[in-house]
Amino acid sequence: MSTPAGADPAVVGPYLAAVLNDERWRSPRLELIAAGMSNLTYVVTPDGGAPEDAVILRRPPTGAVLATAHDMAREHRVITALGPTPVPVPRTLHLCTDESVLGAPFYVMERVIGLHVVDELPPGYADEPARRRELAEGLIDVLADLHSVDHAAVGLGDFGRPEGFMARQVRRWTTQWEATRDRDRPDLDALAARLAETVPATQRTGIVHGDYRLDNCLLDPQTPGRIRAVLDWEMSTLGDPLADLGMLFVYWPQAGEDRPVALSPVTTLPGFPTRLQLAERYATRSGLDLADLAWYVAFAYFKFAAIVAGIVARSAAGAMAGKDTSGFAERIDPCIRLGRAALDDGAL
């Protein structure tokens, strides 16, 4: 029996057998499927069980100084609260805040079977333009549905500090940039200053995912337009929903574009809608006015540039051992140009 770091089957098994009241869990198989700087994700399968019998266990990184009960409880809380809403999320099964069990808090949720698309669509999946459009429309509809959830009604009235959310976001990422400068970049400083001076009024307080994009969702294997589950809620909070839409556009290159900042070329395939078409569908679904959307897009490029600059600076300092950061620095200037174009010309 393998023992992946952070979750010993000899501990996890008896614990799950007790809390789930099912002896099948006493001798499980564990597989670590997501590691790195964010939370660790394991597939836990009962002895003799099939893939559909498995559950997912999430815990903070081993040795993380911020691995507190609050982090796991928060992620568990938002997923649980969204369970009865139209937003597709896994069903939560158990939260453990007793750090003596695994050395950190963790929670367990159902395993949702779905396709995880990162760099390319699987052969034969959404291979017609109409199916790709349906996929994109399903993705944007779920985002609009999330932003339409009455957060107080689902028990998330105190899930964040929505007042002044975007102004705080600009300050936070400006501070982050100033603390981890890879080199002098006056154009990035100027972009930060312009954003701070022009923060739009928030129309609606809603649940913000924080990193909503195609590869943070599981897709229905048979129906491309159906999202089976939205994952990775560790950055979620209450705030301005348009922050999510702006960030999604950073990750959405369209046909005919070759953007150095893009993480995946999937959305350049025929059939995927343009960002403007996505915005129009989102506006219809959510009822929000997108007159200031370009500001949110500019902020998203600024935030992305600050994140990349931090990675570049840490790599130069030798703090990113084992991680390939080649080419990262070349993404920063295009982010600045695209952010400035959004503010100057309303470019999405």
Image: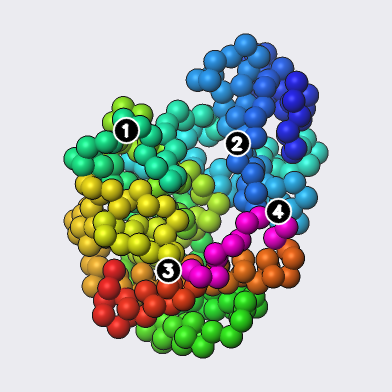
- Earlier in the chain: of badge 1 and badge 2, it is 2
- Earlier in the chain: of badge 4 and badge 1, it is 1
Is disc 2 surrounded by few (<14), some (14 to 19) or many (20+) residues within 10 Å? Answer: few
Q: Which residue is mark 2?
A: 33
CA separation, marks 4 and 2?
Answer: 18 Å
Is residue 134 positioned above or below 4 on the image? below
Q: Which residue is mark 1?
A: 125
CA separation, marks 1 and 2?
Answer: 23 Å
- Residue beneath the point at 56% across and 23% down: 54
Q: Quadrant of residue 133?
A: top left
Q: Nearer the viewer, residue 321 or 204?
A: 321
Q: Which residue is mark 4?
A: 322
The answer to whether residue 267 is left or right of residue 41 is left
Q: Please name the amino acid that badge 3 sits on.
A: Ala
Q: Is residue 163 visible?
A: no
Q: In the drawing, what numbered circle is on residue 58?
A: none
Circle 3 or circle 1, nearest the eye: 1
Q: Please name the amino acid that badge 1 sits on.
A: Tyr
**Secondary structure under badge 2?**
strand
Q: Which residue is mark 3?
A: 300
- Residue beneath the point at 47% across and 35% down: 90
**Secondary structure under badge 4?**
loop
- Earlier in the chain: of badge 3 and badge 4, it is 3
The answer to whether residue 306 is left or right of residue 11 is left
CA separation, marks 4 and 1?
Answer: 34 Å
Is residue 125 positioned above or below 175 on the image? above
Report the residue that reaches farthest toward the top: 48
CA separation, marks 3 and 4?
Answer: 28 Å
Q: Which residues are magenta?
A: 320-331
Circle 4 or circle 2, nearest the eye: 4
Predominant SS along the magenta part? loop
